[in-house]
Image (tube, rainbow, N blue to C red):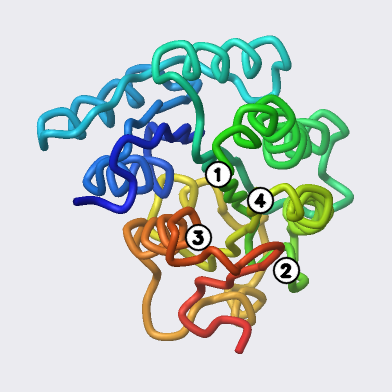
Amino acid sequence: MGRFDGRSVFVSGAASGIGRATAERFGREGGRVACADVNVAGAEETAATIRAAGGDAFAMPCDVTSPGAVAEAIAETVRRQGGLHVLANVAGIGFFRRTTETTLEEWNRMIAVNLTGQFLTCKEAIPHILKTRGAIINTASVAGLKSHPYSAAYCASKGGVVQLTRALAVEYGRKDVRINCICPGGVETPLIGQFTLPEGVSQAALGRIMPLGRMGKPEEVAGTIAFLASDDATYVNGATIVVDGGMIA
C-alpha cells in the first residue's frame, strides 16, 4: 500500500528537475498524477516513466501564468481523476541580474511565473481540495527567507510565495486543508543553469548562498514534498520547510 493510493495529484513544472522527481515520487507511492508543464514533451516523458514503473499518470500543457490555462488544467484533472487531493506547485524560473540591469519585462515575468502562477493554481484547486480535505505544497526558496545578491526579482517572488502560503494556511486550516511550502537551497536541476553571474562579478560574491558540502538532489526535495502531502503530516500547516543542506543554518 502506498501513502497516496487512489489519490489525485497535480504537479506543475513536472517536465524536469524537482517537478519531475516529485511527480515520480507520488507515482511510486500510488498517486494518480497529472504532470503539467509548458514543456509538454518533458511532461510526457515524466508521465511515461511513471506508467512504465506501474503507476498512473498523464501529461498536460499548462502555462501557470495564464488564468485560462490553469483553470482548464485543474478542471481536466478533476474530470479525468474524479477529484483532487494534492496540489504540488513546483513550476518556476530564476536568474542572476544586477538590479539596475533588470528590465520591467524580466521583473514581471519572474513574478508571473513564480508567484502569480502559484496563486492561480491554488485558487483553482482549493474548491476541489476542500472536498477531499487534501493538501497543497508550494515551492518557495531559501531566497524567499534570506537575501541573495543579484536576485531582487527572484527574492521578491519567492518571499511572496512564503507569505501567500501562510495566508492561505490560516484561511483554510479550519476546513481541514493543509497548505505548506518548501524552501530548497541549491539543487542540481536545469534551473541552476539559468543562474549565471553578471559580467565582472567575483565568485566570492556567491559565498554566502552556496550550500554546505554539495548541491541537493531533486529526489531529496521531492521526498519532503511527499511527506507534507501525506497523512504523516496531518498537524503541519502554514509551515516553511527549508531543504538546503544547512545553507542558512
Sequence-wise, the earlier of marks 1 and 3 is 1
For image coordinates 58% across by 61% down, the residue present is 182
Looking at the picture, which amino acid does disc 2 mark?
Answer: His
**In the rendering, at what x and y percent does residue 227 appear?**
43, 62
- Mark sitting on residue 228: 3
Would you place residue 126 above or below residue 83 in this image?
below
Q: Nearer the viewer, mark 1 or mark 2?
A: 1
- Mark sitting on residue 159: none
- Horizontal placement of 81 versus 25: left or right? right
Instruction: Report the front residue among 146 and 88.
Output: 88
Sequence-wise, the earlier of marks 3 and 4 is 4
Sequence-wise, the earlier of marks 4 and 1 is 1
- Mark sitting on residue 134: 1
Q: CA distance from mark 1 to mark 3?
A: 11 Å
Looking at the picture, which amino acid does disc 1 mark?
Answer: Gly
Instruction: Report the front residue among 7 and 149.
Output: 7
What residue occupies the far bottom of the structure in this picture?
249
**In the rendering, at what x and y percent does residue 86 appear?**
50, 40
Q: Which residue is mark 4?
A: 176
Q: Are marks 3 and 2 in contact (CB under 8 Å)?
A: no
Q: Quadrant of residue 235?
A: bottom right
Q: CA distance from mark 3 to mark 4?
A: 14 Å
Disc 1, SS: loop
